[in-house]
């Protein structure tokens, strides 16, 4: 690997961006659907799982960022060096199969139909799928399209959820929340009787981005210009963007005292960026949406699937004014749409880069954006095929994808742990605390996946 000098980090405010995208990847699945659904059924005693899940993902994501910050290349390139051709094959299939299920956009379409007072049919999410494809195809720089879209939505939607929750929750509700963060439920500890372990596993996986999507953080920090990623080039639109030279293989920095000092500054700043945007904002959003569900419909509704959202919105309208309930559904639909938007971008990036890693002579790096749009539109048409077979129940589709993504996380958590410990020496390699957290996450996902499989079969 070639070497150079580590660029000087900018001010923290100019570094904000990649974590907005990763946060947007989680808003429409665990935050809006799975955790609020579970708390509407079982109360706040299970919300500890959201805290644990997003904390695991914070540490996993930072190890993904560590590798790319130092090397200027994605973790997929690094993993191929150690695993050979098995690595790109695995990541193509473990990305495509879990994320082919269009449950997120189906949920967005269902809410949209409710808002427009029309009967839901699969044609609505199909139209939304085409809209996402057009937006990603026409945005000159794909990363900037993503970042701007998520910043606007999160800046508007998250404060609305916070204010609404503070208005509706009383002191007793907050007590239930704080007890729930330590696993104390109403008559149970940690796990209530009768809870679906498959749904809970999916909620764990979606406490943040989930599945292989966390690995896409490699791409986002490269295109934001973090560390050695500054030299790798950006993915641009095939129609409206100016083609940039993209480097698959990165280069590390010279091991000088000045570069080590700069690395420490970079590492401190990117941890702060990801902690404040992804972990803190993501956790508060999950917790507040779950508390809002608990305050409005716990013990008052037996709705299954995403119908609990409509019941929740109607009760919000009764407790405030009808406009507020409508806005709740509008933001929910938009967040779900933005999540599917980000999912398509992340999965297309992952699969297109791994296709090149699999056979760089046959699939050349200069054609990366062609492969990106090939995978993008292939996923869109795959979603349409699924709808055409009559598989359109949103909650079931979301749960299927979440379970499959939990298994993917179990696998790559150990791989990232091994990669960074083999690739770097002190002071660049992860310390004992970060190594321990990733190993505990690996064991946790493994045990939970095994128990879920046993219960299913």
Image (cartoon, rainbow, N blue to C red):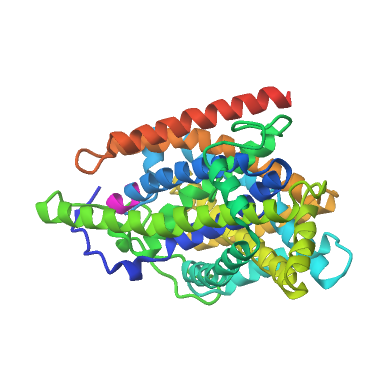
Magenta residue check for 270: no
Farthest-out residue, bottom: 240
Q: Is residue 219 above or below residue 427?
A: below
Q: Along the line of sight, which residue is nearer the eye, 146 or 330?
A: 330
Screen quadrant of the C terminus: top right
Which residue sits at x=38%, y=65%? Answer: 224
What span is colored magenta in the figure?
Answer: 67-71
Residue 26 rendering spot, x and y as whole percentages: 57, 54
Extreme-right residue of the structure: 119
- Pick the residue in front: 68 or 232: 68
Which residue is the extreme one toward the front? 171
For the image shown, how many numbered marks are present on the structure? 0
Residue 56: percent from left, percent from top: 46, 41
Question: Which residue is painted at 10% across and 52% down in the image?
Answer: 257
Q: Is residue 154 left or right of residue 35?
A: left
Q: Quadrant of residue 456?
A: top right
Left-right relation of 451 to 283 = right
Main secondary structure type of the part rendered in magenta:
helix
Q: Position of residue 269 (x, y in %)?
A: 30, 59
Residue 345 x %, y %: 56, 59
> Can residue 1 be seen at all in this image of the molecule?
yes
Residue 246 at least partly seen: no
Name the residue nearer the viewer: 239 or 226.
226
Would you say 455 lies left or right of 69 here?
A: right
Residue toward you, 353 or 32 = 32
Q: Residue at x 36, y 38 (%)?
A: 81
């Amino acid at each position: 690997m070639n070497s150079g000098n580590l660029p000087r980090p900018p001010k923290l405010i100019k570094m904000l961006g990649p974590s907005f995208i990763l946060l947007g990847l989680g808003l429409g699945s665990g935050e809006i659907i799975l955790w609020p659904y579970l708390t509407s059924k079982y109360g706040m005693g299970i919300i500890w799982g959201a805290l644990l899940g997003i904390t695991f993902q914070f540490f996993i994501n930072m190890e993904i960022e560590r590798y790319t910050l130092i090397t200027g290349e994605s973790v997929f390139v690094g993993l191929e060096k150690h695993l050979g051709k098995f690595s790109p094959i695995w990541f193509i299939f473990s990305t495509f199969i879990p994320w082919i299920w269009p449950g997120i956009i189906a949920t967005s379409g269902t809410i949209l139909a409710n808002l427009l007072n029309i009967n839901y049919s699969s044609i609505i999410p199909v139209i939304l799928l085409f809209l996402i494809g057009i937006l990603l195809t026409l945005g000159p720089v794909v990363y900037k399209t993503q970042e701007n879209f998520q910043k606007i939505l999160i800046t508007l939607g998250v404060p609305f959820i916070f204010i609404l929750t503070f208005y509706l929750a009383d002191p007793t509700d907050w007590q239930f929340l704080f007890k729930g963060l330590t696993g104390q439920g109403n008559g149970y500890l940690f796990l209530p009787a009768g809870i679906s372990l498959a749904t809970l596993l999916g909620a764990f996986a979606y406490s943040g981005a989930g599945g292989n999507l966390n690995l896409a953080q490699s791409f986002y920090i490269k295109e934001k210009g973090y560390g050695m990623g500054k030299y790798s080039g950006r993915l641009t639109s095939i129609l409206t963007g100016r083609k940039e030279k993209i480097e698959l293989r990165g280069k590390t920095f010279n091991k000088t005292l000045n570069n080590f000092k700069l690395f420490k500054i970079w590492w401190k700043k990117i941890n702060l960026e990801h902690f404040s945007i992804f972990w803190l904002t993501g956790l508060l959003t999950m917790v507040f949406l779950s508390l809002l569900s608990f305050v409005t419909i716990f013990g008052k509704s037996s709705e299954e699937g995403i119908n609990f959202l409509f019941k929740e919105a109607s009760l919000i309208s009764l407790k405030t004014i009808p406009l507020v309930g409508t806005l709740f559904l509008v933001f929910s639909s938009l967040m779900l749409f933005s999540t599917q938007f980000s999912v398509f971008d992340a999965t297309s990036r992952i699969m297109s880069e791994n296709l090149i890693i699999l056979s760089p002579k046959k699939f050349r790096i200069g054609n990366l954006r062609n492969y990106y749009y090939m995978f993008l539109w292939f996923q869109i048409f795959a979603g349409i095929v699924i709808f055409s077979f009559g598989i359109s129940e949103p909650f079931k589709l979301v749960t299927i994808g979440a379970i499959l993504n939990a298994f993917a996380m179990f696998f790559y958590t150990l791989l990232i742990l091994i990669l960074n410990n083999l690739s770097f020496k002190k002071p660049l390699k992860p310390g004992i605390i970060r190594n321990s957290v990733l190993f505990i996450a690996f064991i946790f996902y493994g045990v939970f996946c095994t128990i879920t499989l046993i219960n299913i079969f």
